Amino acid sequence: MSASNPPFFFQSTQSVDNRLGDMFGFVWASYAGLRELWWQVRGFRDQFPELHIDEIKIKFLAGLPLPGGIDLARMCINREWGAHEQEFCKWILFETCALYEGWAEKVCSDLFPAGRADRCAKNLQFPPGTNTAGNLTGCSVTIAEANASTSPLMVAEFFPVLKASKLNRWSTVEEHLSAFRFFKECRNSIIHSDGLADQDLVDARETLVGLQTSPTNPFRHQFALPVLSVGSPIDLHINDCVLFATVVRLLICTFDAALSVSQASETILEKRLRAMRATKGVFSSLPSDPVKREQRIKRLLAAARIPVPKNFAAVVLWMEQRGIIS
């Protein structure tokens, strides 16, 4: 059963995990293609300096349907590769931030009433803390909301499996959210401050430097973290942006497990199983033979994108009690 069952509970977690992989596939293909074009154009220009740029453009781009065209002089001859790499860094940074924000909004809208969902989603972007009034803030608030009403089924049968994932970073979730905050501040400064560092960003960098240079470094790999000063341009490092995407993947896995215990998660589970049975396909009925029946139910769980439960028999009993199967 485990070969087809996902390692996450929420469908939005599964979707974002896939989209992170798709993003890097496209980014690296684009990176390789532009790098090759940049290198080839510069080399060709060195060999034939007398050619006009339009003639070079015909050499490399003839026959391609390019709306607006490509300014080869600007993109390949007058711009060093480092400038292009900064743009790829921004691409990864912006897309990764958007994916995490969208994931938090979707999961929280599935779990919490509309009046609390937005606040819960925002709290998942911050480490645990307290505000000036002494009230708790950050991810711990959202986790507490999910634990206010838990499902015995989810706690006993799915949470242990999700918690055991090699991607789970609950013990260092605060540190990983601190890394998220630094890169989110980089994104914000690029959008709102013309790419110049402010004091919040400088402070976030110092926090991250301190975490990864401590004896209990919570990160598998070191961030380069180029030096920043207030008012200076942000210098992104492409390996840092790749590691940031890894941090986001670890965070969504960690919170996927932590939030799965909610009673609302059991409701989501039931809806997904009922929807799959209502397709009138192979799952609309179950065989009478006990062995085939068990195999069909396992396939049903996998088709509904449900993780492998700790105790399959207990989940079958719950399904029977709910009238999902008979």
Image (spheres, grey):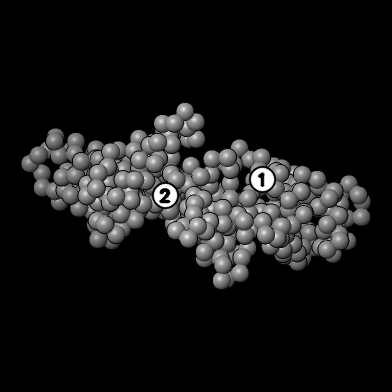
Residue 286, by quadrant, is bottom right
Secondary-structure class at tag 2: helix
Q: Earlier in the sequence, mark 2 or mark 1?
A: 1
Q: Is residue 215 above or below residue 251?
A: above
Report the residue at 54% width, 53% height from top.
139
Q: Position of residue 257 (x, y in %)?
A: 64, 49
Q: Amino acid at mark 2?
A: Arg
Of residues 95 and 230, the one drawn nearer to the viewer in this rendering: 230
Which quarter of the rendered picture does the C terminus lie within? bottom right
Of residues 32 and 60, the one drawn nearer to the viewer in this rendering: 32
Report the residue at 83% width, 57% height from top.
318
User: Which residue position holds label 1?
Assistant: 162
Residue 282, by quadrant, is bottom right
Q: Amino acid at mark 1?
A: Leu
Circle nearer the viewer, 2 or 1:
2
Q: Position of residue 105 (x, y in %)?
A: 52, 62
Looking at the image, the residue that sits furthest to the left is: 50
Residue 55: tell me if it is visible. no
Q: CA distance from mark 2 to mark 1?
A: 25 Å
Q: Is residue 185 above or below residue 205?
A: below
Residue 292: tell me if it is visible. yes
Looking at the image, the residue that sits furthest to the front is: 133
Which quarter of the rendered picture does the N terminus lie within? top right
Left or right of 202? Residue 171 is right
User: Which residue position holds label 2?
Assistant: 181
Report the residue at 61% width, 65% height from top.
112
Looking at the image, the residue that sits furthest to the right is: 289
Q: Is residue 288 above or below residue 228?
A: below
Q: Position of residue 37 (x, y in %)?
A: 27, 42
Secondary-structure class at tag 1: helix
Q: Position of residue 271 (x, y in %)?
A: 72, 64
Report the residue at 73% width, 51% height from top.
155
